[in-house]
Image (tube, rainbow, N blue to C red):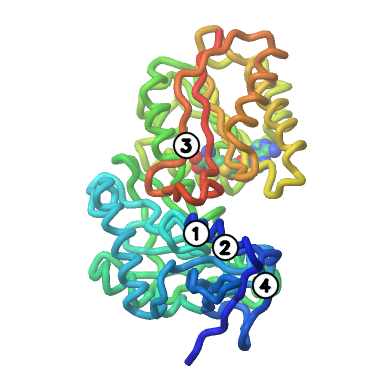
Amino acid sequence: MKRPGVILKKGKEASLMRRHPWVFSGAIQTIEGDVAEGDVVEVIDHKNRFLATGHYQPGSIAVRVLSFGREPIGGNFWRKKLENALALRRELGLAGSNHTSMYRLVHGEGDGLPGLIVDIYGRTAVMQAHTAGMMRSAGEIVRALREIMGENLKAVYNKSRQTLPGRMREDHRDGYLYGEKEEGPFLESGLSFFADWEQGQKTGFYIDQRENRKLLGKFVAGKKVLNMFGHSGGFSVYALQGGARVVHTVDSSRTAIDQAEENLRVNSGFPGRHTAFVADAMEYLKNIWDRYDVIVLDPPAYAKHGEARQNALQGYRRLNQAALEKMESGGMLFTFSCSQVVSREQFRRSVFVAAATAGRHVRILYQTAQPPDHPVSLYHPEGEYLKGLILRVE
Ligand code: SAH
């Protein structure tokens, strides 16, 4: 059966020729054949030359490229892509490791699979489809995952209700596509964590902060640490393991704080060294007398769209200023932005204004990013979302 063809306007082929994996709706001249949300289509230039194969999705990003070749999108395709993804995680020391059992197996465009996220927790894969095409391919994705992972896969949970586009979201029910719930805990760098993919945020755990948590662990011995936006306590557990004298975990969500306390318990509890607070970040920072040697600031994405960028930058400035005012001299601030629309430069600038306003002398020790199981395609810089600044504060 011939696939529908998406014909581009003259000149609009350039970004695809540079292997950028998106076709914006404004680039389309016409669509040949019947096309429905989630269909596999061919992208053709104005001279009728083939450019790419991808998933069609009505909206601003109309096609997400699956292949720059003319290949069938079936069993072999999914197996090959997922095998590549798994091979990389093996090389990174994640898949097959006996001290880390949670990692990201598929990071959308970074693994040549735009619209698909797969995170691994022990022997459970949690998938999130961001497009109708990926949702419709779920059956094939599960089959391919089982083939490549064998005994290491016992369950696949589809958590796409938060991520599917508009109307599809309402019709979707999250649930197991294969197997059943495994309780955990799971391992990260030899530490234990529960991950609640059924009720929790993201796919159940902030896997993307693994490397930054490790770095924190190196700088906290004997220190008083504040883990702001602590969620399920990832940074706190590493800090206590790293010898912190006192750790305070703050999050506005009661559920998150309960999870943090459970994660501390399962790692020996660190009696007498940890306290958790359910509180708003700005309120907490304004009202406390305490000063900290080390503060972690890992807020949720302040801007999801370009229009919200200015407000987000103001938000980062205020938050970082409030934290800098509560730091001991010789302290360290681990500050992050996970807003995809805020660039590294913009984030750094808002922290600069915060430091200048707070009147602190600040040096950058590390500039960090998302870990390598969240790879960024060089042709798709939009995939880089997590930015971290690790600062020495006097
Ligand atoms: N650092 C965490 C992930 C943080 S996600 C980790 O490594 O696991 C952001 C967290 O901020 C969420 O848990 C959310 O509940 C919390 N949050 C959102 N708004 C907040 C606010 N105004 N004050 C405090 N916490 C907030």
Q: Amino acid at mark 3?
A: Ala
Instruction: Report the quarter where the C terminus lies.
Output: top right
Q: 380 or 245, which lies in front?
A: 380
Q: Is mark 1 in CB contact (under 8 Å) with mark 2?
A: yes
Q: Residue at x 57, y 80 (%)?
A: 5
**Is residue 214 positioned above or below 30 on the image?**
above
> Mark 1 highlights which residue?
17
Between discs 2 and 3, the one toward the N terminus:
2
Q: Amino acid at mark 4?
A: Pro
Element type at mark 2: loop
> Mark 4 highlights which residue?
58
| x and y, in percent, of residue 192 in the image | 35, 44
Q: Residue at x 61, y 75 (%)?
A: 7
The circle on residue 369 is 3
Element type at mark 3: strand
| x and y, in percent, of residue 142 in the image | 38, 74
The circle on residue 186 is none
Tell me the distance, in whole angstroms, between the alpha carbons under discs 4 and 3. 32 Å
Q: Is residue 303 left or right of residue 142?
A: right
Between discs 3 and 1, the one toward the N terminus:
1
Tell me the distance, in whole angstroms, between the alpha carbons under discs 1 and 4. 22 Å
> Mark 2 highlights which residue?
13
Tell me the distance, in whole angstroms, between the alpha carbons under discs 2 and 3. 31 Å
Tell me the distance, in whole angstroms, between the alpha carbons under discs 3 and 1. 28 Å
